[in-house]
């Protein structure tokens, strides 16, 4: 008889000596929810992507390990030096996703432009540990994404203090402090025990009680799928044995202009953006959110109705932009009733979910790459990369401020302080879920004609066609 996920994870944790806690299945009676302090994880509901038996018609992308790295002690939390693995999967179109199990980092993602030129569209470094040094570049972020004001929060009358960092003289725990999920070594689920898709990577991590100051042992699954429809699907599932808070995101640093060898990455301020968001969270000086929602109508933060360059907001002298020292704001998805039905549903993606809404579309006006983002989350943090420090990336590529943008899908920033925005509370026997799809295509209208002509001429010459 097929074991439950909890039993299998328990066996795996024992094999890997992950953490000394019990992850075995708990036989739950109808009254077991009355137990105040459960000693074990309950058997979680099996996530859909792990509960199916998939037919492997085409074994095209195995997700095999492609390289191992030794990560230095100062790059990981708790002073542990570990081997880190890098995995790669591809689809039938030729796109490649490369990931590290250090912080579930998406190291690179290649996508074609309007003339079929494949390039990496994410900031990339040679070594996985380089991603942990600053900015949480393309890593998973949590337990609570973005900032936790004052580095503490109240839950059921108890105050919890996270690992605090100082940011512009205001205390905030950034992405859950110094020891966040981006600095943890995650573990890849083995397909022989957990059948899942060949074009998919599924990682898990157990965050122990009181890690980073958060209550409860938290079991997290993170699944990444690269479809033949040119979609990167990111899914999170989490379970706890004690009431806690949870808000995860994947902080992908995009540059649709493509990362090119031995060059400084293209400035993204001319990249065109459309957001299906009619409200933005008010912030005060230092970037601390107030919990008040402001209409974007008539402001430089209004990216609705048409495509606008990122510079519309990033270079604005509006007070709300100055308070964040640039574009780094939490936008709220428009209510479904205000959206066109075809756009608010998930028809563009590989499996239908009416709760997923298209919240953003981004186009590079030079090469025509287009990115559409659909999510089941309530808000998205739009960041124009103004704080990216100077880094030397892979293949001699240079990165600096405004060479990448982020659209982080998540629950509202500081929701633990503002109950009217919703709740990120997670209790035992509940399941946290988050799903976002990054759909790549090419624009029919926005591209440089001269670039297209020159590239097609070069392609014909290389193919020996006159």
Image (tube, helix red, strand yellow):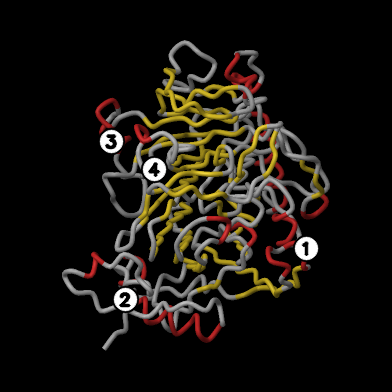
Q: Which residue is mark 2?
A: 53
- In the rendered image, the residue lying farthest to the left is 30
- Quadrant hosting residue 328: top right
Q: CA distance from mark 3 to mark 1?
A: 49 Å
| Quadrant of the image containing the N terminus | bottom left
Q: Nearer the viewer, mark 1 or mark 4?
A: 1
Q: Which residue is mark 1?
A: 74
- In the rendered image, the residue lying farthest to the front is 157
Crowding around mark 4 (Cα neighbors within 10 Å: few <14, some 14 to 19, many 20+) is many
Give the numbered dot on residue 342: 3
Residue beneath the point at 48% across and 53% down: 232
Disc nearer the start of the sequence (3/1): 1
Kindly state the secondary structure of the residue where label 4 is placed: loop
Q: How many marks?
A: 4
Residue 74 at x, y percent in the picture: 77, 63
Disc nearer the start of the sequence (4/3): 3
Q: CA distance from mark 1 to mark 2?
A: 41 Å
């Amino acid at each position: 008889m097929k074991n439950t996920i909890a039993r299998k994870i328990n066996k795996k944790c024992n094999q890997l000596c992950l953490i000394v806690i019990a992850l075995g299945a708990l036989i739950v009676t109808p009254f077991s929810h009355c137990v105040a302090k459960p000693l074990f994880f309950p058997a979680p509901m099996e996530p859909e992507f792990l509960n199916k038996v998939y037919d492997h018609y085409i074994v095209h992308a195995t997700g095999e390990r492609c390289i191992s790295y030794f990560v230095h002690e100062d790059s990981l939390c708790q002073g542990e030096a570990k081997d880190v693995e890098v995995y790669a999967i591809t689809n039938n179109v030729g796109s490649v996703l490369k990931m590290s199990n250090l912080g579930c980092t998406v190291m690179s993602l290649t996508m074609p432009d309007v003339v079929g030129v494949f390039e990496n569209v994410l900031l990339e470094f040679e070594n996985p540990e380089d991603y942990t040094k600053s900015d949480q570049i393309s890593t998973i972020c949590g337990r609570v994404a973005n900032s936790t004001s004052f580095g503490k929060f109240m839950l059921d009358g108890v105050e919890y203090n996270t690992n605090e960092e100082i940011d512009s003289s205001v205390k905030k725990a950034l992405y859950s402090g110094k020891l966040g999920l981006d600095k943890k070594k995650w573990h890849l689920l083995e397909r022989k025990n957990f059948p899942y898709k060949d074009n998919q990577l599924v990682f898990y991590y157990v965050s122990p009680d009181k890690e980073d100051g958060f209550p409860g042992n938290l079991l997290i699954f993170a699944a990444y799928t690269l479809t033949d429809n040119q979609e990167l699907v990111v899914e999170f599932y989490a379970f706890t044995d004690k009431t806690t808070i949870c808000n995860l995101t994947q902080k992908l640093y995009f540059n649709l202009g493509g990362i090119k060898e031995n060059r400084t990455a293209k400035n993204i301020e001319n990249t065109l953006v459309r957001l299906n968001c009619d409200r933005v969270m008010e912030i005060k000086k230092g970037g601390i959110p107030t919990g008040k929602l402001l209409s974007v109508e008539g402001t430089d933060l209004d990216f609705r109705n048409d495509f606008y360059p990122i510079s519309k907001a990033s270079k604005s002298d509006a007070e709300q932009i100055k308070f964040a020292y640039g574009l780094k704001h939490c936008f709220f998805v428009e209510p479904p009733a205000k959206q066109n039905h075809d756009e608010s549903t998930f028809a563009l993606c590989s499996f239908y979910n009416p709760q997923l809404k298209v919240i953003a579309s981004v186009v590079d006006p030079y090469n025509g790459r287009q990115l559409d983002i659909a999510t089941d989350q309530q808000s998205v943090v739009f960041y124009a990369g103004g704080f990216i420090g100077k880094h030397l990336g892979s293949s001699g590529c240079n990165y600096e401020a405004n060479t990448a943008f982020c659209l982080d899908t998540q629950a509202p920033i500081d929701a633990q302080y503002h109950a009217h925005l919703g709740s990120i509370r997670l209790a035992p026997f509940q399941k946290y879920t988050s799903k976002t799809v990054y759909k790549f295509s090419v624009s029919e209208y926005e591209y440089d004609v001269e670039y297209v002509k020159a590239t097609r001429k070069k392609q014909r010459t290389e193919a020996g066609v006159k």
